[in-house]
Amino acid sequence: MRMGFEDPPGTAERTFRGGRPGEERMPWGGGLVAEDGSSWGGPVSEERLSWGGPVADERLLWGEPVSADQLAAAERAYARCGPAERLLWERLSVFEGTFGRDAVHEVCASWTLPPGTVLAVLDRLVPIALLLVDDLFAGEDDVPRYWMPHPMRAVGARRLTARGDRPDLVLRHRRWCVTLARRAADWWQSGRQLDARDLALRELPDLAAAMDPTTAPFARDDEAGTSVEIAVSLWFLWVVCGRVAEGRTRLRHALALLDGEPTARALWLAAFLELESGRPEEADPLLVRAWAAAVRDGDGGALGLLAHLRGSTAFYQGRTRAAADEYREALALMGEYPEFGPTRHACWAGLALALCRTDPEAAQEALDQAELDRESRWTWVGRDLYAEAWSSIARAELAAWDGDLERASEHARWALREHLRMGSAAGAAGAAELLAQIRVSAGRRDAAAHLLGAVDLLRGSVFDVSYRPAEFCVATRARSERALRLLPGGRELRSAYEEGARRGLFALAGEA
């Protein structure tokens, strides 16, 4: 599964079991045979679907070229199916991406296709209209997953609309997406953060469709609330995992069509995404509205979220004393086990970062308290990898303050790798710039220039040209650049900078 920004985050990379269509015979029998022009349909089908090379008559369906011959073969395969298989074929066309048996059971079963028989019908339909795919993530149970090729989906979608069942199926699909988003959010909160990210990325084609109120079968404002709920549940995907611009666009679109006042958590996320986009001035009015909504709705849990975000905003702007006060308030307002949003560990990490350059002893105390706080909750929740990565940046600062450059380097390198693994562009850039500063202090100026070049490439590819990093990062970068300017060999440093930009942070993190 690909991750990160230089190789942009996306849905789970699809692998066809037995090879890609049109390359070799599929091991589950029937369907698609090899390069000799093999067939779609049942095990004894003689129909042909061409998957490679240019075709004379093709159209774009869901962004992919599909030929008239492929559509005709899919129609003939559909015609050979029984009533139950046809009905399931049509209903499966609502899925935008891959899906599992549980999704089929939840979305497609009804009184005309009973829950007790729908999976048996699915098994009969697989060799005719579906491909088995391998997009399971690490630790997931080895269960079958499927994908419907576009010609088959087009045939099913047309029949589903003609039958008059599309509105009901789309509504069921949207409700299933709500459940998926909630599951991912629960996994994130319980410490299964990589699993939560991988689940959200794999299911993103379907989740994205459900987040668009204009695809709803009924009035847009009726379904905008569902779209907002999904977007808010996936807050970690937008804020932490390198998809800030996408999350901001989707949430703004859904909120624009919402009939009524947004919830405090929706406004909190909107403010958070403005901050992560480098627009703290846009976040402030949203924070005020979110606080009013939390009071109006009696959402006490949102008050802790808002205090944390006020702390993050103050930290971004360089108001470290105000940031520390807000993080302390967030810790006081948060419950023992926050069920949504940043964890207590994230508040301790923010507090340590706010203090590490002005009050190192208080920053170390915050890190120690974070460890005690986390260990007391170990049996209830897992590790907050994102908060730990930020804590490591604070530890690197404190080690550098003590003059222990080797230990500072270890902490900064670990933070860089973890932020890259999670997909956090802001975190990775901050960790890399701190590591560059440590490299300058250790006399490794070429290594520092490599890192700075890679950081600029990363920021330029992820953020808007108007983006300005947090003041903490600006100060770190200024120290490194000032030190490098004082050193001889400007041409060599420029060459090292350009080499770092070519290689990128992922390569440098592996050898830093």
Image: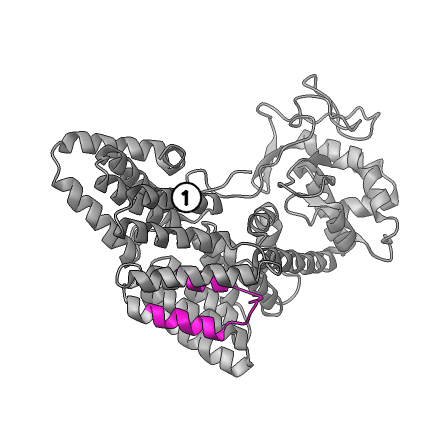
- Three-letter amino acid code of the residue under disc 1: Trp
Residue beneath label 1, please?
A: 414
Residue under the image location 55 percent in, 52 percent down: 193
> Residue 11 placed where, x, y %?
56, 43
Residue under the image location 55 percent in, 58 percent down: 234
Q: In the figure, residue 327 lies in which quadrant?
A: bottom left
Dominant secondary structure (helix, strand or loop) of the stretch shown in magenta: helix
Q: Residue furthest top?
A: 36
Residue 460 in view, yes or no:
no
Residue under the image location 36 percent in, 45 percent down: 412
Span of residues in magenta: 323-349
Q: Nearer the viewer, residue 253 or 204?
A: 204
| Mark 1: few/some/many CA within 10 Å (<14, 14-19, 20+) | some
Image quadrant occupied by the C terminus? top left
Is 337 magenta? The answer is yes
Image quadrant occupied by the N terminus? top right
Q: Answer above or below: position of 164 versus 152.
A: below
